[in-house]
Image: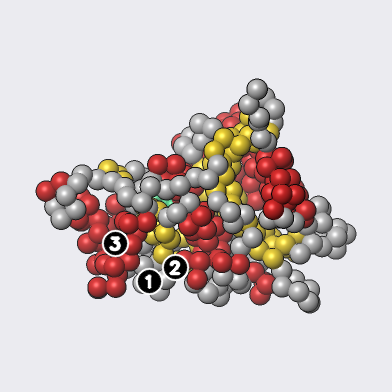
């Protein structure tokens, strides 16, 4: 009989065999996975639960919150605050940080998340997800927002869960990328793929083409050349896919290659991009790099961008190595 590896065993082995993770980090990741299972259940209920549509509130980015944005945020906080492994949490849905209340022990880790990524897809029954990143608190004084402002290379774990035809958890602790599929009968995540690798070349790109006229010249040039197909400078036909949930678009790229672009847009020149560095771009960039891909804002490796604010935005280009390097060279030539 082939051995089945559930997430718990995978993490215990990571802790025991190569000391790659601490017992507290193992517990933290198990709790995040458990919260994702609960979010998955809420997502699956759809109209049968009170989870569809908008709430009467906006988040710190001024976006109208969906009911599921709020539910997912609460599930992650409630699951994580009492275990003793965390000092504080930060989320797309909260302006400031959530410090673990002092009725619970405080741990040394910091958890950041986008509780429900791709919110616009909830009501139309298209894949959405949760993205998370784990940092370690700096030693010393009481935890503050400043503790969260660490670069992406400081992450100790990162991952996402996609709520799609399957519920899939994708995780890195810095030694490759592992993929787990939720076994609904067992209620556990089963390891279904290890050491994911992104092909270096691709013929597929993901970008919101309706924004094309607002992009900077290097991005316009790259996409124009892809669109010219076999008769153009690239000499091959490209395919386009755009789910509109970063989790789903990046998941496709981790699975079969491709590039994901969310560029700067001249309508909002002061914003570097739409996506958020700390809980969207950084965790996804680490996963992409761990799978052999490249993640950049055009000029800088995303993981090297200094963190200056919790809800900092960034332009994002990530995926197959040779394509993203081409895009970097177009930025350098511009
Ligand atoms: P969200 O975190 O509020 O859901 O917003 C982020 C999402 C990404 O998942 C996705 O790539 C992008 O916004 C979609 O943007 P667009 O509306 O341009 O398709
Ligand atoms: Mg998001």
Residue found at x 36% / y 67%: 298
Along the line of sight, which residue is nearer the eye, 303 or 13?
A: 13
The residue beneath circle 3 is 326
Along the line of sight, which residue is nearer the eye, 305 or 129?
A: 305
The residue beneath circle 2 is 301
- The first of marks 3 and 1 along the sequence is 1
- The first of marks 2 and 3 along the sequence is 2
Left or right: residue 256 compared with residue 48: left
Q: SS class of the residue under badge 3? A: helix
Q: SS class of the residue under badge 1? A: loop
Q: CA distance from mark 3 to mark 1?
A: 12 Å
Which quadrant, please, contains the N terminus? top right
Circle 3 crowding by C-alpha within 10 Å: few under 14, some 14–19, many from 20: some
Tell me where residue 135 appears, x and y as whole percent.
Answer: 66, 63
Along the line of sight, which residue is nearer the eye, 289 or 296?
A: 289
The residue beneath circle 1 is 299
In the image, which is nearer the foreground, mark 3 or mark 1?
A: 3
Left or right: residue 56 compared with residue 325: right
Q: CA distance from mark 2 to mark 3?
A: 14 Å
The coloring applied to the image is secondary structure
Residue 156 lies, with reference to residue 37, above or below; the image says below
Tell me where residue 308 appears, x and y as whole percent.
Answer: 55, 75
Circle 2 crowding by C-alpha within 10 Å: few under 14, some 14–19, many from 20: some
């Amino acid at each position: 009989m082939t051995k089945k590896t559930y997430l718990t065993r995978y993490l215990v082995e990571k802790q025991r065999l190569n000391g790659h993770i601490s017992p507290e980090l193992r517990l933290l990741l198990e709790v995040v996975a458990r919260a994702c299972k609960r979010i998955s259940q809420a997502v699956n209920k759809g109209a049968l639960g009170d989870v569809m549509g908008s709430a009467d509130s906006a988040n710190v980015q001024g976006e109208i919150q969906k009911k599921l944005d709020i539910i997912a945020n609460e599930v992650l906080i409630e699951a994580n605050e009492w275990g003793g492994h965390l000092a504080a949490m930060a989320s797309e849905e909260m302006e400031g940080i959530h410090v673990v209340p002092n009725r619970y022990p405080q741990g040394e880790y910091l958890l950041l998340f986008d509780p429900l990524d791709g919110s616009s897809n909830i009501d139309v029954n298209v894949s959405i997800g949760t993205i998370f990143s784990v940092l370690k608190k700096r030693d010393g004084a009481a935890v503050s927002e400043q503790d969260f402002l660490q670069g992406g290379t400081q992450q100790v774990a990162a991952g996402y869960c996609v709520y799609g035809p399957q519920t899939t958890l994708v995780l890195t602790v810095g030694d490759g990328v592992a993929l787990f599929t939720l076994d609904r009968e067992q209620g556990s995540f089963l390891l279904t793929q290890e050491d994911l690798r992104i092909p270096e070349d691709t013929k597929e790109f993901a970008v919101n083409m309706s924004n094309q006229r607002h992009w900077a010249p290097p991005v316009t040039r790259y996409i124009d050349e892809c669109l010219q197909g076999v008769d153009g400078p690239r000499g091959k036909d490209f395919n386009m896919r755009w789910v509109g949930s970063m989790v789903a678009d990046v998941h496709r790229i981790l699975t079969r290659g491709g590039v994901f672009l969310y560029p700067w847009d001249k309508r909002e020149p002061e914003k570097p991009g739409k996506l958020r560095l700390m809980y969207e771009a950084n965790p996804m960039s680490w996963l992409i790099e761990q799978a052999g891909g490249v993640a950049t804002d055009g000029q800088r490796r995303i993981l090297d961008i200094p963190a200056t604010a919790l809800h900092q935005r960034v332009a994002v280009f990530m995926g197959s190595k040779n394509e993203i390097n081409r895009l970097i060279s177009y930025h350098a030539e511009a």
